[in-house]
Image (cartoon, rainbow, N blue to C red):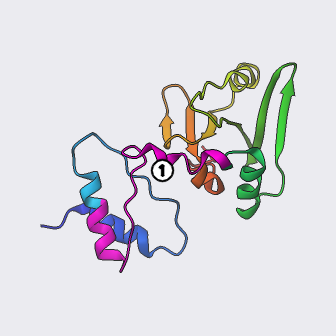
């Protein structure tokens, strides 16, 4: 019996233009198994990397988690205008304008991802959501309107439909 998700993954794979693959779900439902199966079926070679099992792997991105690197990622994605915001001691590294909406992005290089400046900005301008780029895994927290982006998908920011 072939699972529907495998069919959908193959459909995603043949698209000429596609967003990064993000597979989320409840623990112990077979996400890893499905992705490994898809990798074997769709590619002659693939690599399985789990940042949660080996924390040293996630540190690969920490040394490059600097605003200059993220600007390079944005530029490679075709972003021409990148802004920042500062008020007294609060500073948000990036403001991205996409389809008339402003998306604030704060960069955190360590394990502490408290974004106090981002909170100050949000209290003043009430953006739809706030984003933090760090070495942490992707996490879309809809309840608190905070999105954590790992560096490796910075060029695809924002992942969610920016027209909404």
Quarter of the rendering occupied by the C terminus: top right
Between 23 and 115, the one lying in front of the other is: 115
Residue 157 percent coordinates (x, y): 63, 50
Q: Which residues are magenta?
A: 35-63
View extreme (bottom): residue: 44
Between 16 and 41, the one lying in front of the other is: 41
Residue 69 percent coordinates (x, y): 73, 52
Q: Is residue 113 above or below residue 25?
A: above
Circle 1 SS class: helix
Question: Which residue is identified by label 1?
Answer: 57
Residue at 77 percent of width and 60 percent of height: 75
Residue at 61 percent of width and 49 percent of height: 151
Q: Is residue 12 above or below residue 114?
A: below
View extreme (front): residue: 56
Q: Is residue 130 above or below residue 71?
A: above
Position of 11 compared to 129: left or right?
left
Q: Quadrant of residue 133?
A: top right
């Amino acid at each position: 019996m072939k699972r529907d998700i495998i069919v959908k993954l193959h459909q995603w794979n043949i698209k000429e233009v596609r967003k990064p693959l993000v597979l989320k779900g409840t623990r112990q439902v077979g996400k890893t198994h499905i992705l490994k199966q898809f990798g074997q079926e769709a590619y002659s070679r693939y690599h399985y990397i789990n940042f949660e099992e080996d924390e040293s792997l996630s540190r690969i991105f920490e040394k490059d988690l600097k605003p200059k690197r993220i600007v390079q990622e944005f530029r490679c994605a075709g972003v021409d205008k990148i802004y920042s915001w500062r008020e007294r001691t609060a500073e948000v590294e990036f403001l991205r304008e996409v389809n008339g909406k402003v998306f604030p992005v704060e960069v955190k290089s360590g394990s502490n991802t408290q974004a106090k400046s981002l909170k100050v900005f949000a209290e003043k301008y009430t953006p739809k959501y706030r984003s933090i780029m760090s070495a942490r895994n992707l996490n879309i927290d809809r309840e608190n309107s905070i999105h954590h982006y790992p560096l490796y998908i910075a060029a695809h920011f924002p992942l969610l439909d920016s027209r909404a």
